[in-house]
Image: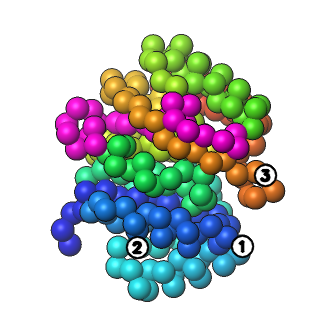
Amino acid sequence: MERPLLSVIMPCYNESGTLPRILEAVRGIALDKEIIAVDDHSSDTTLALLRAEAARDPRLRVIHHPHNRGKGAAVRSGLAHARGEIVIIQDADLEYDPQDYYELVRPIVEGRVDVVYGSRFMGRHTGMYFWNALGNKGLTFLTNFLFNSWISDMETCYKVMRTEVLRSLRLESNDFRLEPEITAKVLRRGHRIYEVPVSYLGRTYEEGKKMKPSQGFYAVFALLRYRLWE
């Protein structure tokens, strides 16, 4: 098959409530793309929904984990099957808007940079918890301090880059430590991170938000590890 411009990797874990709408939103983006959805052993109807969608959409491929392994493992599984020139990570909830793909991909297509991050703090956002936002700011400050960089949103889901760049990082995290691992390795390899504003509509814990404040401590250890020992 002809190589598409964009590979959208979509980790899924118990996202049956939002999955049809996010798939529709991604499909509506007028870019040559494929969607690789990775079901991380959901206990709801996520896998059944994905398989039904894939049966009528040749651009959608479904990967299933027989055991729950975490977001990082899901991204790695999707990356192994990606055929696009550029890869983007898309959460299966509705917090991030795929309409931002155009501006996220543009600097790479134009040859200006190889890595683009979508910054929630530069764009429009609502529904972000105070302590989560403060923790994100702290982790981003630590990232900038350790790697002599200047970015505004290290924990953003929208990390976009050439596929060969992401593969060259040899990712190993299984859980949410994936975010600092990607950023640390990108910066250590000398890539510039170009940020563009994105919109963000945060969901509550009652609506299924999975990020917990305690995970920030693991992110700190990951940043220190990839800066000092690797």
Decide: is 195 above or below 38.
Answer: above
Q: For mark 2, does the 10 Å Cα neighbourhood hold few (<14), some (14 to 19), or many (20 or more) residues?
A: some
Q: Which mark is residue 60?
A: 2
Q: Secondary structure at mark 3?
A: loop
Q: Quadrant of residue 196?
A: top left
Distance (Cα) linking label 3 and label 2: 29 Å
> What's the residue type where badge 2 is placed?
Leu
In contact (CB < 8 Å): disc 2 and disc 1? no
Q: Quadrant of residue 134?
A: top right
Q: Secondary structure at mark 1?
A: loop
> What's the residue type where badge 3 is placed?
Tyr
Q: Could you tell me residue 82's position as x and y percent?
A: 34, 60
Q: Nearer the viewer, residue 15 or 99?
A: 99
Of labels 2 and 1, earlier in sequence is: 1
> What's the residue type where badge 1 is placed?
Ser
In contact (CB < 8 Å): disc 3 and disc 1? no
Q: Nearer the viewer, residue 170 or 94?
A: 94
Q: Is residue 3 left or right of residue 8?
A: left
Depth check, mark 3 against mark 1: the one in front is 3
- x 40%, y 66%: residue: 28
Depth check, mark 3 against mark 2: the one in front is 3
Decide: is 155 above or below 190.
Answer: below
Of labels 3 and 1, earlier in sequence is: 1
- x 55%, y 55%: residue: 91
What range of the chain is rendered magenta?
A: 106-128
Question: Is any part of residue 80 visible from this angle?
Answer: no
Tally of numbered discs: 3
